[in-house]
Image: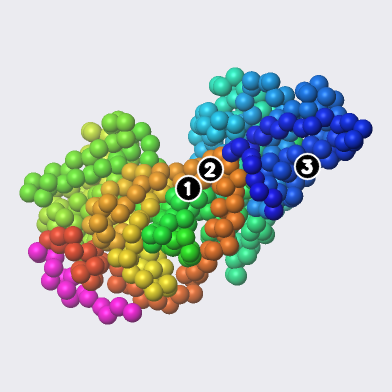
């Protein structure tokens, strides 16, 4: 490995000595040797198509060459040769390929600054809103091709719109960096994901080689490259790799934990020396996905709830202050915490008919708790929470806490040892730690240890476009990460039973949570020994 003298970023400009009778090295060798010296590597390749115009380009540009390079985890490639006097930017596209939404960011590769951002609904939702439905649909060749075509076509259309917005051409996009969970990565690349949901849960591939973007149908520069974040198994995907990269926890001396709640709850614990990861089914309820009034965070979604313990009057706050349409995950967690604090639900999450009387109505043989009456909603219908829906939330919060606890115990630490707690995703951007702690979903840590990352997957995908170091860090993260399989972990089930109470059967774990005095005897009677 040579010592690098390169400027940061993927756009390099080098000046070469012109050939002479004393220095008659071939044009390509001359160019590659100069570029290798700047990059500090011998692992460099160039496509035959680029060599065709190289002689003329070198001579008309006075042997000064501006080029776009990229690398996978261990080898560089020359992507394009550019005019050093051309003021037009060379750009890259970062993608967060989510189950429900796709986020894209256009980045100037030379200045390393974002140029534009766009979010759109993943068109695969028309086949099925959940991953499982899509995987079953993909088990025919036609179904797999259809799912891939829907996604790639939508990416191309939205990229065209981004480029028009900035006065650019799509051919000025030379690098694409994509992060998604394992299933979405497979569907994006057109790889059959069926084995992900069958024991022993094996992906087609974990480390995806650097690809020509055109091979999967992306309409960017004809020689543009596609970097796809790797995954480890079925439930630890490239989106979490990107999140780790964005958080920087893999470079920290502090014991840190990252939680990203989406389709599943994906968790990684560690520091610069080691990383341990796992995933579990705790996501849909925590995103408001199991309630009839549930919706993703957006205009009109209830994201904050408070209840006056004396009057039991409910106050809600919505995104963009619009009339309530539904409730997102943070609002649902707020609601449960407020109901508990007001003594309107007990330690098992069951409604107290006496204290909830004016809010409880019976419909179709089921009790509904009216959060917002129809006269105050955007739809004119009551926004309600049923006991079954609340029970599902309690199971999800218990699963979330148990995932965290089991992961910590697997490496011989306690949750109290965590020095930095990163919460990622749309869920994490609006969650109130006090409410999450109040129902026993997150550990009772000092609040200054909690850090909201927002969309860490797109953040990491952007970082891969900024410099070689971002790509190198992905390799380091992959090499030091161990995956813990929870499906066969008996300790998980033991702890899960103890966590299905608010906040927990062991109140010493939640010293900041005030349990209404009327509920304490019931909680004491439910205490069980923990393994």
Q: Magenta stretch: residue 50 in it?
A: no
Q: Residue furthest front?
A: 22
Nearer the camera: disc 1 or disc 3: 3
Nearer to us in this view, 232 or 90: 90
Pointer 3: residues within 10 angstroms few (<14), some, or many (20+)? some
Q: Are marks 2 and 1 in contact (CB under 8 Å)?
A: yes
**Residue under numbered circle 3:** 33
Q: Position of residue 396 (x, y in %)?
A: 36, 60
Point out the tag, 1 or 3, that comes first from the N-terminus.
3
Over which residues does the magenta segment extend?
Answer: 517-531
Q: Is residue 37 above or below residue 486?
A: above
Q: Position of residue 272 (x, y in %)?
A: 47, 60
Marks 1/3: CA–CA distance: 33 Å
Work out how far the residue at label 2 is from the one at label 1, CA to CA, in angstroms. 7 Å
Residue 399, visible in the rendered structure: no
Q: According to the image, label 1 marks what residue?
A: 246
For the residue pair 18 and 298, the one nearer the viewer reads as 18
Query: Residue drawn 41% across and 60% down?
Result: 253
Considering only order in the chain, which callout, 2 or 3, is on the residue closer to the N terminus?
Answer: 3
**Location of residue 15 (image quadrant):** top right
> Could you tell me which quadrant the C terminus lies in?
bottom left
Q: Is residue 82 visible?
A: yes
Q: Residue at x 58, y 42 (%)?
A: 467
Quadrant assignment, res 383: top left
State the residue position of label 2.
463
Relative to 341, residue 330 above or below: above
- Whichever of labels 2 and 1 marks the residue nearer the N terminus, that label is 1
Query: What secondary structure is marked by label 1?
Result: helix
- Residue 530 covered by magenta stretch: yes
């Amino acid at each position: 490995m040579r010592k690098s003298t390169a400027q940061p970023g993927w756009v390099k400009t080098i000046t070469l000595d012109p050939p002479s009778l004393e220095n008659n090295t071939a044009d390509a060798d001359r160019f590659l040797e100069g570029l290798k010296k700047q990059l500090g590597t011998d692992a460099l390749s160039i496509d035959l198509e680029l060599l065709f115009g190289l002689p003329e380009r070198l001579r008309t540009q006075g042997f000064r060459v501006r080029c776009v390079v990229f690398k996978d985890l261990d080898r560089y490639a020359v992507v394009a040769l550019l005019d050093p006097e051309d003021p037009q930017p060379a750009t890259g596209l970062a993608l967060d390929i989510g189950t429900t939404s796709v986020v894209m960011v256009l980045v100037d590769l030379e200045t390393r600054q974002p140029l534009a951002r766009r979010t759109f609904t993943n068109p695969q939702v028309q086949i099925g809103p959940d991953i499982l439905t899509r995987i079953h649909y993909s088990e025919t060749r036609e179904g797999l091709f259809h799912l891939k075509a829907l996604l790639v076509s939508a990416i191309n259309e939205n990229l065209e719109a981004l480029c028009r917005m900035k006065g650019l051409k799509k051919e000025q996009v030379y690098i694409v960096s994509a992060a998604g969970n394992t299933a979405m990565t497979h569907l994006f690349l057109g790889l059959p994901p069926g084995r992900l949901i069958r024991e022993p849960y094996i992906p087609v591939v974990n480390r995806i080689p650097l690809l020509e973007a055109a091979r999967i149908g992306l309409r960017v520069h004809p020689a543009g490259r596609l970097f796809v974040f790797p995954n480890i198994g079925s439930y630890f995907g490239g989106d979490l790799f990107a999140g780790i990269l964005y958080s920087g926890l893999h470079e920290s001396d502090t014991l840190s934990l990252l939680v990203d709640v989406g389709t599943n709850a994906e968790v990684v614990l560690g520091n610069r020396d080691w990383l341990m990861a796992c995933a579990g089914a705790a996501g849909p309820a925590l995103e408001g996905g199991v309630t009839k009034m549930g919706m993703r965070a957006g205009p009109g979604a209830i994201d904050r709830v408070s209840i006056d313990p004396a009057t039991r009057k409910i106050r809600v706050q919505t995104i963009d202050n619009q009339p309530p349409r539904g409730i997102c995950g943070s609002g649902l967690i707020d609601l449960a915490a407020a109901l508990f604090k007001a003594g309107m639900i007990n330690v098992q999450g069951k409604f107290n008919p006496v204290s909830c009387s004016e809010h409880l109505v019976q419909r179709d043989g089921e009790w509904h708790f009216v959060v917002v009456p129809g006269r105050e909603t955007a739809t004119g219908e009551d926004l309600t929470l049923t006991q079954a829906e609340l029970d599902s939330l309690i199971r999800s919060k218990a699963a979330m806490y148990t995932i965290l606890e089991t992961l910590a115990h697997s490496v011989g630490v306690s949750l109290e040892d965590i020095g930095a707690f990163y919460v990622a995703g749309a869920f994490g951007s609006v969650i109130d730690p006090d409410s999450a702690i109040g129902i026993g979903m997150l550990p009772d840590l000092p609040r200054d240890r909690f850090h909201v990352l927002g969309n860490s997957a797109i953040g990491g995908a952007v970082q891969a476009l900024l410099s070689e170091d971002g790509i190198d860090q992905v390799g380091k993260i992959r090499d030091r990460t161990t995956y813990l399989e929870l499906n066969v972990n008996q300790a998980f089930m033991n702890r899960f039973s103890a966590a299905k109470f608010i906040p927990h059967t062991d109140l010493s774990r939640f010293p900041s949570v005030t349990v209404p005095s009327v509920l304490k005897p019931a909680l004491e009677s439910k205490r069980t020994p923990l393994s």
